Image (tube, grey):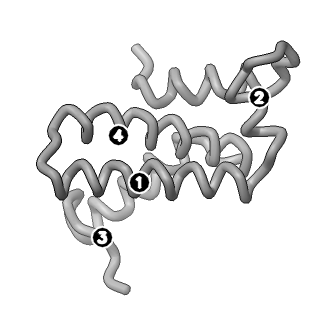
Amino acid sequence: MKHPIDQLFDAVQLARDDTKVGSRTAQLLRDGNPKIAKKVVEEATEVALDAVMSERDGVIRESVDLLYNLTVLWAWMGISPSEVWHEMEIRERELGLAEKWPK
């Protein structure tokens, strides 16, 4: 069974060529990187603001929006979820899964 993020990525890829009016995914992909990146930032901000306000349900809802927009960004940039999972595996081996590379 595929991971939900992989399923979402596949759906985003299918929507890439959708020409029907109202396809938000197709429109985002047509708008390109600046618009998609802006949406990622907006959704990340909304997640953070809901977290500050201890709005648990808001964090859940906005997290879904963030994952959607992040997946659109990956598709636009030609990044597959498997590449992200691979990077997670590298970090797990080097640092432990719940760590990140120091800046």
Q: Which residue is mark 1?
A: 44
Q: Nearer the viewer, residue 53 or 25?
A: 53
Q: Is residue 102 above or below residue 17?
A: below
Marks 4/2: CA distance? 21 Å
Instruction: Describe the element under mark 4 as helix, strand or loop.
Output: helix
How busy is the neighbourhood of tag 3: few (under 14 within 10 Å), some, or many (20 plus)?
Answer: few
Q: Do the residues bearing badges 3 and 4 touch, measured as CB atoms within 8 Å?
A: no
Choose mark 3 or mark 1, whichever is in front. 1
The location of residue 90, given as percent across then percent down, is 38, 61
The earlier-in-sequence mark between 2 and 3 is 2
Closer-to-camera residue (76/59): 59
Q: Secondary structure at mark 1?
A: helix
What is the three-letter code of the residue carrying label 3? Lys
Mark 2 near mark 3, Cβ–Cβ under 8 Å? no
Query: 10 Å neighbourhood of mark 1: few (<14), some, or many (≥20)?
Result: some
The residue pinned by badge 3 equals 100
Mark 1 belongs to which amino acid? Ala
User: Label 3 to label 1, Cα distance in Å?
Assistant: 18 Å
Q: Which mark is residue 63?
A: 4
Label 4 Cα crowd, 10 Å radius (few <14 / some 14-19 / many 20+): some
Q: Amino acid at mark 4?
A: Ser
Instruction: Specify which label sits upstream in the sequence, 1 or 2.
Output: 2
Which quadrant is the C terminus positioned in? bottom left
How many angstroms separate mark 4 from mark 1 (CA)? Answer: 8 Å
User: Which residue: 62% across, 23% down?
Assistant: 10
Point out which mark residue 26 bears: 2
